[in-house]
Image: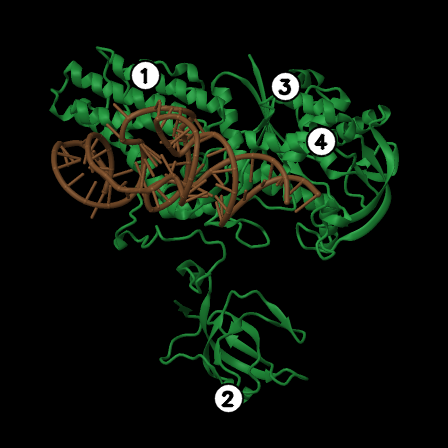
Amino acid sequence: MEKFYITTAIYYVNDIPHIGSVSEAIATDVIARYKRLKGFDVFFSTGTDEHSQKIENRAISEGVEPQKFVDKASAVWKNTFDKLRISYNRFIRTSDNDHVQVVQDFFNKLYEKGDIYPGKYEGWYCIREEMFLKDSDLIDGKCPYCGGEVQKIQEENYFFRLSKYRDVLLKYYEEHKDFLRPESRYNEIVNVIKSGLQDVSVSRKSFKFGITVPFDETQTIYVWFDALINYLTAAGFYNDKEKFEKYWPANLHIIGKDITRFHGIIWPAMLLSYGLPLPGSIFAHGFWNLEGTRMSKSLGNVVHPVDFVNKFSEIAQINEDLSIDVLRYYLSREINFGQDGDFKMETYLKRYNADLANDYGNLINRTLTMLYKYNDGTVPSLTHLDNEAIKFMEDKKSEYMRYMDELNLSIALEEVWQIISYLNNYIQVKEPWNLNRGSSELNDVLYNLIEGIRITTILLLPFMPFIGEIILKLMDSYSGDFNKLTWGDLKSGIKIQKIPPIFPRINLLTKSAGYRGVEKEKIEVKESEEGNIKYNDFSKLDLRVAEILSANRVPDSEKLIKINVSLGKEERTIVAGIGKFYSPEELVGKKIIIIKNLEPRELMGIKSNGMLLAASNNAELSLITIDRDIDAGTKIN
RNA sequence: GGCGGCGUAGCCCAGUGGUUAGAGCAUCCGGCUCAUACCCGGAGUGUCGAGGGUUCGAAUCCCCCCGCCGCCA
């Protein structure tokens, strides 16, 4: 079996997963699943990048051990990927023990070879970007990338002799036009190499959270050097030579366009220096904007994929697993893989309705309905092969394969949708409702439709694994490989369960659907951006009627009054800042409104369990009371 | 500032010298009834960013200008 080793970049634990990072993992997963279905022995690695000064600083400021911090942060990524059905074979962490060993071994070897040498670094360093900067880089003395403060540093470091590899890299690029894709990235990197390469610092003195230089305990290996090597570790470089021999070199590194230079220049130079074969290809994809603006943590408009999936499952009234398939479909279909994209609710809903509900979902639904109406839900046997239909299918299949091999994921999906259109048209042309029940003509039409759906669904498995499982199980033909794509493999005589529409259409026009204006809806990034909250938000508040049993001024405080209230079954102490407007005496006996489930807080040494409601401006304050008598403890809604 | 890319239908994009410039979505009209107001068929609409040039012929090649983007400095 031919092997296929594919990787994502590893994700920086200081970040949280968002649509962009997750779209890389999804695209990689789609390719991995496709290769598996084609019969490749696939090894798929992803994971987290955990070493850096920034992380060390952050952990310290939060009062946690750095390792504890990254354990937690790494788990967030892993859980997200598990949820999104990312079918990785190894989730590597740069703090994994075997990785530490590999990095040290690698560093040693390059040092012995003379490609790593001690030198002196002098210049500016931006902690936030973790970049060394030159005088000319700075803008008003600040980091040109993040605008943050920079530090002047001067220290002994180890350097990697990158300059030595300029010519060999250039030659390699000229001989391997596919080494870096898309072509625009290839051209960029070739230009950079042509203009000359400088040796790069690969260690730092001033922080500890990282991998120590094996022969110099005062130095920590620079995070990029450390991170790139994950691709070797994941394949078993340290403790599984046999596995490593089998899978290395990686066939495909999927990365973001921002890290092209590390992967296109430093990484191959490192491998050349060590004497390892270079990866087959590096593919740099673009970024997803959100509703037209760049997604970034500092702008606060990061969409969390799992939150989004949950929200959409509510909107579309589908379960979470299906909602995940929809996300995977949208990200794969909306743009040509490699380009930048714009993640928009409007187009998301259009894709869902037009492609999934109207075309694919409705095809399944109408076919199943006819199968029940005309043949009792049982797959009939096939009398005559429809050669025209078969030829169409075969053509589309091979186009699909070609585009998938080229990583043209969206075009490959378009080919599948041409099959779906063909089948919808097939029904129109054959008019099954005008054919005699039990006739071979009708039976052939029904068989062909179900067979077409089966094949379509198998082709969609890399993108939508969950829907694939559902549909194929109905046909008793769950298949783990593309060799089952032959027309006629569908078994006759099985009874197919009738299921309700898989992707219910979202009604964008009528208000009665309850999702009024959903098409205009933007993806919410901040809660209550418009000043409105959802009913759900309101219902989180537990508001109660409370009767004041006693009230006393808090000593040494002008306005705090300590109040004991009855909530019917229980009593509570609340501290309220109403002493300027109410005397303790007049409070006793009043029935007021309190928030019961507000987290307790200590004021002047007294624990306040809840909060009372009052209307106030600077001059006046009035407690909220009730205008008819009702028992203390009654819920407000 | 240097190198490169892009600017085509309301929207997103395909098309790199040759008959009336294309697909999808959206719109409108017609049809069908198995189906999720769905599906099928049809209809469009474009100074192919502006100007100039080469050519029998240019969205396509060349020059220049405008706008946007990427990499580098």
Cα distance in 3D space between marks 3 and 2: 90 Å
Q: Secondary structure at mark 4?
A: helix
Q: Amino acid at mark 1?
A: Leu
Specify the subunit that label 2 lies on: A
Residue drawn at point x = 28 percent, y = 19 percent: A494
Residue drawn at point x = 50 percent, y = 57 percent: A526
Q: Amino acid at mark 2?
A: Glu
Left or right: where does residue A542 sit relative to residue A43?
left
Q: Earlier in the sequence, mark 1 or mark 2?
A: 1
Left or right: where does residue A60 sit relative to residue A507?
right
Q: Earlier in the sequence, mark 1 or mark 3?
A: 3
Label 3 with label 2: CB-CB less than 8 Å = no
Dot label at residue A586: 2
| Label 2 packing within 10 angstroms: few (<14), some (14-19), many (20+) | few
Q: Amino acid at mark 4?
A: Ile
Q: Nearer the viewer, mark 1 or mark 3?
A: 3
Q: Earlier in the sequence, mark 3 or mark 2?
A: 3
Q: Secondary structure at mark 2?
A: helix
Chain identifier, brown in the render: B
Q: Secondary structure at mark 1?
A: loop
Image location of residue A363, percent across then percent down = 27, 30
**Dot 3 and dot 2 within a common chain:** yes
Cα distance in 3D space between marks 4 and 2: 77 Å
**Residue furthest top as drawn:** A384
Specify the subunit that label 4 lies on: A
| Label 1 packing within 10 angstroms: few (<14), some (14-19), many (20+) | many
Cα distance in 3D space between marks 1 and 2: 82 Å
Dot label at residue A490: 1
| Colour of chain A as rendered | green
Label 1 with label 4: CB-CB less than 8 Å = no
